[in-house]
Amino acid sequence: MLIVQKYGGTSVANVERIKAVAERVSKTVKQGNKVVVVVSAMAGETDKLINLAYQIASNPSEREMDLLLSSGERVTSALTAMAIEELGHKALALTGRQMGIFTDAVHTKAKIERISAERAKNALNEGYVVVVAGFQGITETEDVTTLGRGGSDLSAVAIAHALNADLCEIYTDVDGVYTADPRIVPDAKKLNKISYEEMLELASLGSKVLQTRSVEFAMKYGVPVVVRSSFNDNPGTLVTKEDEDMEKVVVSGIAHDVNQAKITVMGVPDKPGIAARLFKGIADANIVVDMIVQNISSAKEPDKPATDISFTVPKADSKKALKITEDIAKELGAKGVDMREDIAKISVVGVGMRTHSGVAAQMFDTLARHGINIMAISTSEIKVSCLIDAKYTELAVRVLHDVFELAKAA
Amino acid sequence: MLIVQKYGGTSVANVERIKAVAERVSKTVKQGNKVVVVVSAMAGETDKLINLAYQIASNPSEREMDLLLSSGERVTSALTAMAIEELGHKALALTGRQMGIFTDAVHTKAKIERISAERAKNALNEGYVVVVAGFQGITETEDVTTLGRGGSDLSAVAIAHALNADLCEIYTDVDGVYTADPRIVPDAKKLNKISYEEMLELASLGSKVLQTRSVEFAMKYGVPVVVRSSFNDNPGTLVTKEDEDMEKVVVSGIAHDVNQAKITVMGVPDKPGIAARLFKGIADANIVVDMIVQNISSAKEPDKPATDISFTVPKADSKKALKITEDIAKELGAKGVDMREDIAKISVVGVGMRTHSGVAAQMFDTLARHGINIMAISTSEIKVSCLIDAKYTELAVRVLHDVFELAKAA
């Protein structure tokens, strides 16, 4: 088999961890596999570099930021290759450029356009373990780019696709994907298998095991991904195409996200084009809007129809989003703008929902029975999300985990 | 003017120092100059990385070592470009590859073969300050190389030549080149001007201000180099072609080197080819031999002529060199091998020696008058070197500085 193994920051945090990675790679090679290793920067290194940059410049150039940050993964790739050689294998460290990862020129969040993997292919055929610096690529004009936070996951999945690998293993500091956050729900179960779609909902909703874009990429090209721990030999969670087994399970997991803020524009005149004006303004500021809910306002003046629009944005962007919203609200003649940061989004996720009804009703009923008020609801084919007061986060996750009997799952 | 400014590790050691570099660059630009900045890794970073590598592998791959070490200068180049932009200039950080520094494939001590400076030239014409990661290059097969310790000096001089720059300024933590080490001779004078040849002798003899290969390169192509401090505005020392002024000064400086070990092979049969056999063995192990002195042995058996051969090697290589020498000595039928590490090489340097006689005699006499025994002597056109007991190093430097009246120089 050809296996791509990606090791995150905590898995290469120090000399001992890097040696442990080399041991695992060595074992995989001795089992008769060809191995491509993709590494992140040593834990803490990227933040250290970002911190240096902001001490030097209030608004550092993104091109130079990419050059700066790409150094962390280069260091790890070289050290990891040395550690693998020390165990008697041939190893070749490749930078993003040497791996042929060409991206667009959108610095700090570049998109992979193509991978020219000839050098890696040749090295694999010559018996080398190839060790790739994750998170980075290069533009057609030879400038270094990075793929955004968690980008090494995307590097690994894209390389697995380019090399037509049999498996892409993502090594991290947790055993896999759980039915809920084990810190909140002690009897949360590890899932043996999960669909790409479910993983997308769980990852983007706060179970930060795998970067969202890497899951989208894996789904698009059908790359089988296993999420597992580099600290033990537990088998992990396979992320793969939806299958019949999965559909029998109605709910796969409960996700929560406390990093969103809710902004509500009250009394917006109910005319076409209003929402477009508002969300274009926010998108222009590169702020990602998550949930959007439009409520019919209990209009006191029925001849002047008005609505309330609520939406959530990452807390990091909330001040900026509030300012933009207030400006646009004024221009649109809205009654006012309100923001709440002490909120949580609780989501019930499962591909089984496609064929089973009643999940949403059971969720609302369960929250109500525990006195948890729902501020907004949003649904997709395979999930139901509710915004609630943040102080009920743990309670909501636990009671939903119970009611959907997830401790029996896996 | 087009000026290349190189900043060493202590000059970019932290955020404050990098900001100070940016201020100096800004000032130079505002005076109407185009500027190319070449930076080293932040002080201590390269050693930190080397240390990591040796914790991981007893004999780390040199190719991977180069990839590892090159990251330090990339970090500094990005941070320095950010700092320059913060002062309102346009700045572009370039890696060794982006600067087009092509080298041979001798990893960890690669030689520059050519520089394709188009990108840098275009950027300069567009008004950018170009900031280059020093110490690194790239092979024709796209592998990262490094130029050996102090290689950023060579990067700077080679780039100055490639761009036909008017001046190459080497910023370090000392004011320039002194008549002797000021820590030993408090009234040592800074030299305003020195010839390439003298600088070569002084640099390779232990006044480690400028990397030897960078001086050779500057001499070969006539690149004017100024060595000066990044911690003040003192004018520094100009390293340039020999001129009439210089020839009037008989002795320019006193150098000392305590990092050599002396190995003596005793009672070597005096036959052709013996020295060649010995030094080929040592060269094959990549050990650089400095002084070589062959003494006629006071032969007890006049029918079997024999000699003693002494030579010096860097202390770091002394154990290895001793082993090789012992093996060859046995094979050659020599009487024995002896090694001393507590030695110092003291050198008197000056282009004026070409036209003035008596310098050597005065040196020997001065040492003798102070009870300092000379173990070996070696001379060139512009220097005389003596090996002495290391404990007399400071005394020897001081009395020679006095006798050649260098405190009055500069």
Image (cartoon, coloured by chain):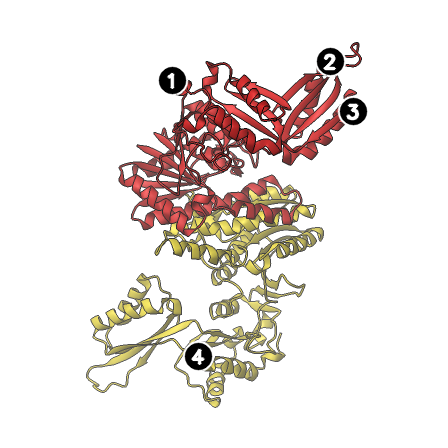
Chain colours: A red, B yellow
Residue A271 numbered mark, or none: 2
Q: With A154 as the anchor, is A299 left or right in this view? A: right
Amino acid type for the residue under numbered disc 1 = Glu
Up-down: is A267 above or below A206?
Answer: above
Q: Say if mark 1 contacts mark 4, CB within 8 Å.
A: no
Query: Mark 3, mark 4: which one is toward the viewer?
Result: 3
Residue in front for this viewpoint, B370 or B61: B61
| Label 2, residues with CA under 10 Å away: few <14, some 14-19, many ≥20 | few
Residue B278, percent from left and from top? 28, 69
Front disc: 1 or 2: 1
Q: CA distance from mark 3 to mark 2?
A: 15 Å
- The three-letter amino acid code for the residue at tag 4 is Ala
The label number, if any, that marks residue B27 in the structure image: none
- Disc ID at residue A330: 3
Return the residue nearer the eye: B218 or A278: A278
Between label 4 and label 2, give the one nearer the viewer.
2
Q: Give the mark nearer the N terminus: 1 vs 2.
A: 1
- Judging by the rendered image, the residue that carries numbered circle 1 is A244
- The single residue placed furthest to the left in the displayed view is B303
Q: CA distance from mark 1 to mark 4?
A: 82 Å
Q: Residues within 10 Å of mark 1 (few under 14, many from 20)?
A: few
Q: Residue at x 41, y 27 (%)?
A: A408
> What distance separates the C-alpha of mark 3 from that of mark 4?
83 Å
Q: Chain of mark 1?
A: A
